[in-house]
Amino acid sequence: MPTQPITKNKNFNARQVKRIFVRRLGIVIWVSFLVAAVQSMVFFALFDPVYLWQLSSWHIDISYWQGYAMGFACFWAFLFAAGYVIGIVMALPRAQLAKRIGTK
Amino acid sequence: MSTQERETIELNLYQAHKKIYPREVKGRFQFKRKLAVVVLLGLFYLVPWLQMGGEQAILFDLPNRRFHILGLILWPQDFIFLALLLIIAAFSLFFFTALAGRLWCGYACPQTVWTEVFIWMEQLTEGGRNQRMKLDQAPWTWNKFRKKTSKQILWVTFALWTGFTFVGFFTPIRELANHIWIWQLGPWEMFWLFFYSFATYGNAGFLREQVCLYMCPYARFQSAMFDKDSLIISYDEQRGEPRMRGKKRRTENNPGDCIDCTLCVQVCPTGIDIRDGLQYECIACAACIDACDEVMEKSGMPKGLIRYTTEHSLSGKPSRILRPRVILYALVLFGLITGFVTAFMMRSPISINVLHDRNTFYRMVDSNTIENVYTLKIMNKGRETAQYQLSASGLPELSVVTDVDSDMLQAEPGQLISVPIKIRAPKKIANQRIHNILLSVMSGQHKNSEEVKYFGYKK
Ligand code: SF4
Ligand code: SF4
C-alpha cells in the first residue's frame, strides 16, 4: 500500500492496512469531489464553456452540458491526483517510522 | 485535542463499522426536529413546482446560463451576488455555531433531514429498535424478506423522487416530468437523476452517521467556533453520578440521579454515550435530552439531567451570550447582508463596459472639434428586448455619435452587443490632457453610466 498509517506503537495486520488505505482513498476521492464542485461553480460562472472550447486548440463545438461535465470531470481528476500524491508524500518513509517506533 | 484523543479517533477510523439502531423517541425537541424536516423537505419538494408569470419560479437554468429567482433573472455577470450569498451563508453558520453549537447539524443539515425520513420508513416497515436488531440477526424467512423488500421499495421510490426533484431545479420540472412519462430523458437528466437518487439512498439509508463522522468538513472545524459559552448538549455529571440501577440503587443511601437505563445511548443516532462528556460525534440532535427527560419524569425527578447548557454554566460560572466572538461574527454578518441588499437594489438591467481605442488618443473631426473612439459593450440583463440611447456628460457640448443603425443598438434578453462609438467635443473645451466624463446608456426608465477617460486637445 502506498500510504502506511502513521500511528505510533501500532502494528497493523494486512487487513487493517488495506482498510486504512481504502478509507484514505475514499477521503481523497470525496474531498476532491467537493472542491471540484465548488471550483466548477466559480469557474463556469466566470467563463463560458462553449466559448472556451471554441477558443481551445481543437476548436470543438460542444453543448453546455458536455462543457460543464467535462470541466467538472477534469477538475475532479486533477484534484484527486493532487490529493493522492500529497497523501503518499505526507506518509513518512518507512525507515523514519521504524526509527520512531524503536525509540519510544 | 490531546494526542491520546487523536489516536483513539484515528483508531476508530480503522475499525469495521458497526450498524447503529437508533431507538425511536418522542419529546419536545424531537417535535421541533420533525417540524424542521417537514418544512425543509416540503420546501424542497414543492418549490420547483411553483410557477410565476408563466415560468418556473425558481430555476437554475444552466444550459442557458441564467437563474430565475422569483421573477428575477440573474446572469453570469451577477456571479458576485451568488458569491456574496454563499459567504453570508458561511458566516451565519459561524454565528449560529458560536451562539448555539451544532444547531445546523441537529435540525437543518440535509444529511440529518433525509436520514430522519429514511429511519422513519425503516421503523414503519421493520418496527422499533429491538425488532430491527432481531430481524437483522434472524435467518432469512418469508417475513424478513417481506419487511426488507417493502423497506427497499419505500427507500428507492423516495430516493428517485428526490433525484427527480433535484434535477427539476435545473431543468423545467414539468417538462422533465413529461420526459419521464414518455420515457425520453436526455442523457444528462438521466445521469443527474440517478446520481442524486443514488446519493440520497446511500447517504440516508446506509452511511448515515458515518457521513458526519468521516466525511463532513463542518463537523471537523466546527469546534473552532466554540467557546465555553456556546450552547452544547451535556449530561450533568454532578447531579447524575454515581449512576446506579435496580437493587443497588435502592440500598445505596445517596445515589446520583442517573438510573443507568442507557436509553440516552440507545436513542443516539451516532451511537455515543453522552455521559462520557462532549464528543465530536455528537450532532446535537437532542434525542438523548428527550429520552432522559421522559425517564426523569417517570421516576419523579426533575427534568434536565441531560440538557442544553454551556460549559461555563456546568462549572457554575455565569454564561454570557454577548462575547467578542459572537459580536464579531454578528458585525461581519450584518455588514455582508447590508452590502448584499444595497448591491442588489442598485443592480441595473443594463450592464456596460467601455474600452478606449488603443491606437489613438483623439482624432480631429474638423478644425474645431475632436473625437475619442471607444468600443461599447452592453449586456441586456432585463427580461425584455431593449433599445438603447447614449449620452455623455461631464463636459459642455459633448455628443455621442455612432455609425451603426439603431437596430444595432438593440439587445434581446441576455444578449451582449458591441458597438463602436465616438464622443465628440469642441477642442477649446476639451483642452486638458485627460478629462473624466460620464457615458450613460438608457433604455426606458433604466439607466447605467460609466466613467471614461477622454483625451483632450493639448499641445
Ligand atoms: S456533521 Fe456534517 S453532515 Fe452531519 S449533520 Fe453536521 S453538517 Fe450535516
Ligand atoms: S449524544 Fe444526544 S444529542 Fe448527541 S447525537 Fe447522541 S442523541 Fe443526539
Image (spheres, coloured by chain):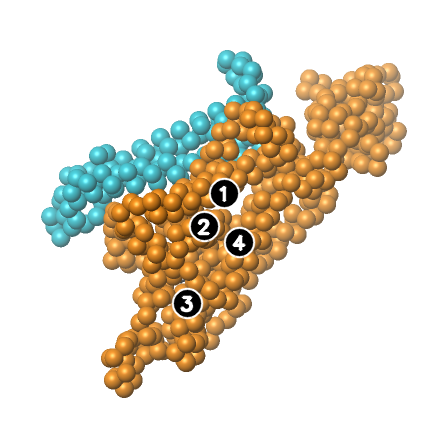
Same chain assignment for discs 4 and 2: yes
Q: Quadrant of residue B245?
A: bottom left
Find chain B in the image and tell me its colour: orange
Point out the frontmost of discs 4 and 1. Answer: 1
Q: Quadrant of residue B331?
A: bottom right
Q: Residues within 10 Å of mark 2 (few under 14, many from 20)?
A: some
What label does residue B158 carry, if any? 1
Comes first in the chain, label 2 or label 3: 2
Comes first in the chain, label 3 or label 1: 1
Comes first in the chain, label 4 or label 2: 4
Protein chain holding label 1:
B
Q: Amino acid at mark 1?
A: Phe
What is the x, y in percent for residue A20?
A: 25, 42
Same chain assignment for discs 4 and 3: yes
Q: Amino acid at mark 3?
A: Ala
What label does residue B121 carry, if any? 2
Which residue is label 4 attached to?
B37
